[in-house]
Amino acid sequence: MMSPETIKEKVQSIIQLPALPTIAMEVVELVDNPKTSASRLGKLISTDQALTAKVLKIANSPFYGFPRKISTIDFAIIVLGYDALKEIVISISLVSSLQKKSDTMFDAKGFWDHAILSGVLARRLARDLGYRVSGEVFVGGLLHDMGISVLHRYFKNEYKRIMEIIHETDLTALEAEESVLGVTHAEVGGWLAERWNLPDHLVEAINMHHTPGRADKNKDLVALIHCADIFAWRMSPQPMEFDKGAEFDADALNHLQINDPQVLQEYMQTYRELVKVDLEAVTQFDQSRGA
Ligand SMILES: [Fe+2]
Ligand SMILES: [Fe+2]
């Protein structure tokens, strides 16, 4: 078995990606330029089909609360705003840069749906609970499980073994990871976030999304992302196996003051309704694109 230090070294060294994929850097530059027009930005994003589809999916999420269907990138830019768009594009690019296609061990679409749902839910939950909503809440939600992509892509054999344990035993996904690697996808994701020089509290949120009680930099952010993750996982039509056995953490619920089971249930109910609308919108969207 590799030691956690070896894994950390490997995670931080094999991934010789530029800090950000080219398209993300170009978008950031354009957004930072006050003279950039929506249509110029739109053109750039539109050169990347997959990116376009994901931006539109997020813009059309009822969690963003926009009543009309957003079918063009130009319109999405106006609705989301430059800054929100920048965060969305960066985080989508980061996750995409890691990802490979689906195989028998990895459901790429399910992974994306979970990432996006966690992002929009984290943002919504923050707003509903009266936290100042920063882009980091969304970005953290979107990136929280990127360690899973790292394992799938760069630790093939270990990943396969973890999946077998998840399927064949009663262990939770985290226990399966611990038993094979000595660490979990949360730490692995945190190491990569560190390597990518993401802000400290995002590193912490990714690293501790399953152990929010250990957070000390930004407890709000970690708790919000943890809860959004569990909400997302409980609501998805086909729960992700790599989150098998995930439960709400008492510290996070207490911290956000949603530890009353009835209150939690009410949130769950409200969000479930929104997810239903979300799924219908997404299905329609996929169909209209002929996907
Ligand atoms: Fe996770
Ligand atoms: Fe997750």
Image (tube, helix red, strand yellow):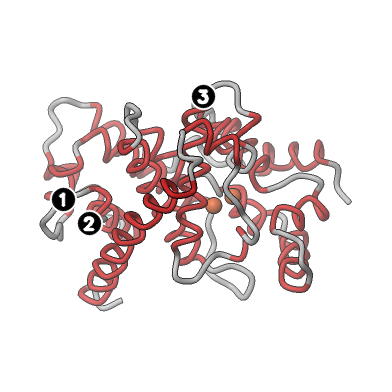
User: In the drawing, what numbered circle is on residue 77?
Assistant: none
Q: Are marks 1 and 2 in contact (CB under 8 Å)?
A: yes
Q: Residues within 10 Å of mark 3 (few under 14, many from 20)?
A: some
* Residue 39 locus on image (x, y percent): 11, 45
Tell me the CA gap for discs 1 and 2: 7 Å
Residue at 77% over, 73% down: 168
Q: Residues within 10 Å of mark 2 (few under 14, many from 20)?
A: many
- In this rendering, the answer to whether 202 lies above or below 39 is above
Which residue is under mark 2? 60
Residue type pointed to by label 2? Asn
Q: Which element carries disc 1, helix, strand or loop? A: loop
- In this rendering, the answer to whether 121 lies above or below 212 is below
Residue at 38% over, 50% down: 267
Q: Using residue 243 as the reference point, say whether residue 255 is left or right of it.
A: left
Q: Which element carries disc 3, helix, strand or loop? A: loop
Residue at 25% over, 77% down: 287
Which residue is under mark 3? 218
**Earlier-in-chain disc, 2 versus 3:** 2
**Earlier-in-chain disc, 1 versus 2:** 2
* Residue 254 locus on image (x, y percent): 53, 34
Q: Quadrant of the C terminus?
A: bottom left
Which residue is under mark 1? 66
Q: Using residue 269 as the reference point, say whether residue 78 is left or right of it.
A: left
Residue type pointed to by label 3? Asn
